[in-house]
Image (cartoon, helix red, strand yellow):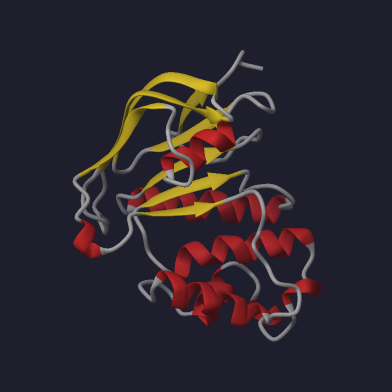
């Protein structure tokens, strides 16, 4: 843990978890026990079940069998997790700052202001633009900014480094490192390395 503990201590645990789609299991008999401050990279070939596992952990897909538990989380404090999929959920004709304000209103204003989060992710100069004018990498930064305006202890991130340039990759590593140092937990599906010390790796499928 760390001297900058912000989030209450909790653990994400799975017990004999099978998950898949259409009744076909992609991940089988998975046992995890991930305490606060843990970062886990999900690796594997396309179709190995990385996205399916994230969706199951997020509660967006029901498990085929087994269970997912959040130990130590008090529902009275609000939702425990952010799920950030491989799509950016950006409306082209909605302003950049308005997009972030929408997500903050939906998820709760428990973090940075939209203006602060845009500055933090290098998008302050684009705040008044329609989101459709952003490049693919900038839209990915906007998706990451959603994590900053509403604080939640668990981040489930699907290919968060997609379309990011070198500076964007460094930003992602910094944000994940800071989140873990505050007692957060991050599970990240990715084909690429993320420069955060101490990340664990789980390879799904045949290990490709």
Identity of the residue drawn at 68% across and 56% down = 167
**25 or 70, which is in the foreground?**
25
**88 or 174, which is in the foreground?**
88
Q: Percent x, y for residue 7?
A: 26, 56
Task: State left or right for residue 13 relative to residue 195.
Answer: left
Return the residue found at the far front: 23
Identity of the residue drawn at 21% across and 54% down = 8
**38 or 130, which is in the foreground?**
130
Return the residue found at the far top: 206
Q: Is residue 33 visible?
A: no
Identity of the residue drawn at 50% across and 22% down = 27
As drawn, 157 above or below 50? below
Q: Is residue 75 visible?
A: yes
Q: Percent x, y for residue 32?
A: 34, 27
Task: State left or right for residue 183 relative to residue 205.
Answer: left
As drawn, 123 above or below 68? below
Q: Percent x, y for residue 196?
A: 49, 41
Position of the N terminus by quadrant? top left
Q: Percent x, y for residue 62?
A: 44, 38
Which picture quadrant has residue 207? Answer: top right
């Amino acid at each position: 843990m760390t001297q900058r503990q912000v989030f209450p201590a909790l653990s994400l645990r799975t017990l004999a978890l099978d998950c898949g789609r259409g009744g076909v299991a992609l991940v089988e008999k998975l046992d995890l026990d991930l305490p606060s401050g843990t970062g886990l990279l999900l690796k594997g070939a396309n179709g190995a079940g990385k996205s399916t596992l994230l969706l199951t952990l997020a509660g967006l897909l029901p498990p085929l069998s087994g269970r997912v538990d959040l130990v130590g989380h008090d529902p009275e404090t609000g939702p425990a997790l952010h799920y950030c999929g491989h799509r950016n959920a950006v409306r082209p004709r909605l302003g950049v700052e308005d997009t972030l304000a929408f997500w903050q209103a939906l998820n709760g204003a428990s973090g940075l202001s939209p203006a602060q989060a845009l500055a933090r992710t290098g998008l302050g100069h684009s705040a008044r633009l329609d989101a459709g004018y952003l490049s693919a990498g900038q839209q990915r930064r906007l998706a990451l900014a959603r994590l900053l305006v509403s604080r939640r202890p668990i981040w489930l991130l699907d290919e968060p480094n997609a379309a990011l340039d070198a500076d964007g990759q460094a930003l992602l590593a910094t944000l994940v490192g800071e989140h873990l140092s505050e007692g957060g937990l991050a599970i990240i599906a990715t084909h690429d390395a993320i420069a955060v010390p101490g990340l664990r790796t789980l390879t799904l499928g045949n290990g490709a």
